[in-house]
Every structure is written in C-alpha cells, then in structure tokens.
C-alpha cells in the first residue's frame, strides 16, 4: 500500500466510528484534456482537493492561468456519499448549460474530493443551449476518463511490544493482514510500529492475542487519512 498520509485525528484506545472505515476513489493527480467543438476550445482540468478552501484555490489558479478565456466553469465535490459538499457555477454561460452538466458528470463518476474547471475559448460559432450542455459534458467526461485514480482510506498506526521469541511470527501476522511495519525498536522486547487500514486492524488484533495467548495487545497511537495509490 503506497500511501500519502494526511493526519485527521489522534485517537486513544482504538475507538472509531463507521464513517472512518470509508473507502472511496479520488483523483491521484491533476489532469488536463482539451476538446474542440465548432472551433470553440474546451480545456478541462481536474484535480484532487480535500476542502472547500482548497477547491476554491484550485479554481482561482485555473482562472488566473486562463484569464483571457471566454469562460472558466467550475464544479467540485468535497467528501463522499451523504457527507458530500457540492458546488457549480455557469461563469457567464446561459443558466444550467455549463456548471450543472459538469457537476452531474462528477456526481456520476463515483469520485470524491475532486474539483473540475472547464475553460472555454469561444470559436465564433454559437452552440445553443443543447450544444453547450453536450460540449461541457463531453469535456468533463474526457478529463475524467484520463484521470489517474487513488483510494482514500482510514488507517491506524499502532505499537506493540513483542518478545524476541515471537518477533518473526508477529512480522508474518502483520503482513498477513496487509499491515506495514514502519519501525522496530530493539530493547528488552522489540517494539513494532505498524500501520493497518481501520478495517484490517481488528483481525490483526485478534490474531495477535491468539498468537500470544492473550499476552499481547497492539495500542493505537493515531488514526490518519491515507491516500492509497493504485
């Protein structure tokens, strides 16, 4: 699991709620695609964002880059599922012909934490309302089709003091539950610091207790949000 970590909470003794076990796809990197419709250029730029402020900063940056464009139409989704924050704007295009089509594509993509700006350079031929809807929709779909994806997961970072006699077996148990050993400190015992997804940790904990006949328990040090790049 190749992960970029963003800490969102430090937790005490392993209590967490069901929201923290959510996995959902997000963009892995900023991506840009251009299409042309009747001489108008539609430049679609999509990027990962984790907050409304970050989405607004991304939109402002794209608008500054294409400040001479006819329109820079934004849309974004922050979060996922029932906790999503959605926004779109037509940026001077006829009402409902630009921002809403972009948002509809984002909502249908299954992605969370994503921002999109479609920049239009007018080519001299009016597209009409139906043509605009199709053009903005096609630009949004084109960039999402090219977008590399990752998965947002919640992880626990844990510590456990392991007798030398059980060290290799605990290492194997960690790997069996898709854990990643971050550090090993050698003293009277070996203190292992490891990271697990929230979903996989309880099974590791159960296996650890079984292996040690109840003597060993891993302590959760923090719970973090991680981006798992596929």
Image: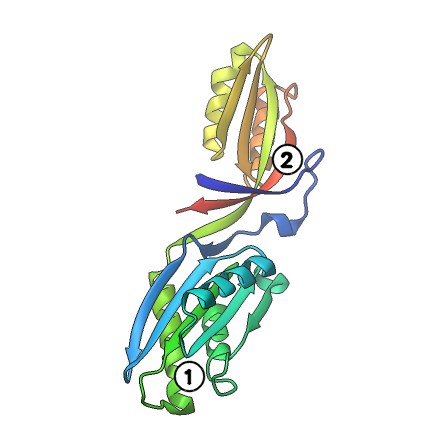
Mark 2 lies on residue: 222
Q: Locate residue 77: give its quadrant.
A: bottom right
Judging from the image, what secondary structure is the residue with disc 2 in?
Answer: strand
Task: Please give the name of the residue rendered at 42% of the width and 72% of the height, measured from the top-left corner.
Answer: 118
Judging from the image, what secondary structure is the residue with disc 1 in?
Answer: helix
Colour pattern: rainbow
Image spot of residue 213 (x, y percent): 62, 19
* Residue 51 vertical position relative to residue 4 in the rendered view, above or below: below
Which residue is the extreme one toward the front?
Answer: 68
Q: CA distance from mark 2 to mark 1?
A: 46 Å
Image spot of residue 61 (x, y percent): 47, 62
Task: Please give the name of the residue rendered at 41% of the width and 53% of the height, measured from the top-left corner.
Answer: 29
* Residue 83 placement, left or right of 63: right
Image spot of residue 25 (x, y percent): 47, 55
Which residue is the extreme one toward the top?
Answer: 188
Which disc number belongs to residue 133? 1
Using the image as rendered, state which of residue 155 and residue 208 is in the foreground.
155
- Residues at discs 2 and 1 in contact (Cβ within 8 Å): no
* Residue 120 placement, left or right of 164: left
* Of callouts 2 and 1, the N-terminal one: 1
Using the image as rendered, state which of residue 135 and residue 107 is in the foreground.
135
In this orientation, does residue 112 appear? no
Which disc number belongs to residue 157? none
């Amino acid at each position: 699991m190749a992960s970029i970590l963003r800490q969102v909470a430090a937790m005490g003794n392993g209590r967490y709620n069901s929201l923290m076990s959510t996995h959902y796809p997000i963009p892995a990197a900023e991506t840009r695609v251009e299409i042309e419709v009747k001489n108008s250029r539609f430049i679609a730029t999509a990027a990962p964002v984790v907050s409304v402020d970050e989405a607004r900063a991304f939109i402002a940056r794209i608008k500054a880059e294409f400040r001479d464009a006819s329109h820079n139409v934004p849309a974004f989704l922050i979060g996922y599922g029932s906790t999503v924050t959605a926004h779109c704007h037509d940026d001077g295009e006829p009402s409902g012909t630009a921002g809403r089509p972009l948002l509809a594509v984002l909502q249908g993509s299954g992605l969370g934490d994503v921002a999109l700006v479609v920049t239009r350079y007018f080519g001299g031929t009016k597209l009409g309302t139906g043509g605009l809807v199709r053009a903005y929709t096609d630009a949004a779909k084109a960039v999402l089709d090219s977008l590399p994806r990752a998965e947002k997961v919640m992880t626990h970072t844990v510590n456990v003091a392991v007798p030398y006699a059980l060290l290799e077996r605990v290492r194997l148990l960690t790997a069996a539950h898709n854990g990643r050993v971050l550090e090993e400190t050698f003293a009277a015992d070996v203190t292992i610091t490891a990271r697990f997804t929230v979903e996989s940790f309880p099974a590791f904990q159960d296996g650890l207790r079984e292996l040690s006949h109840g003597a060993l328990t891993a302590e959760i040090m923090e719970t973090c949000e991680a981006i798992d790049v596929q």
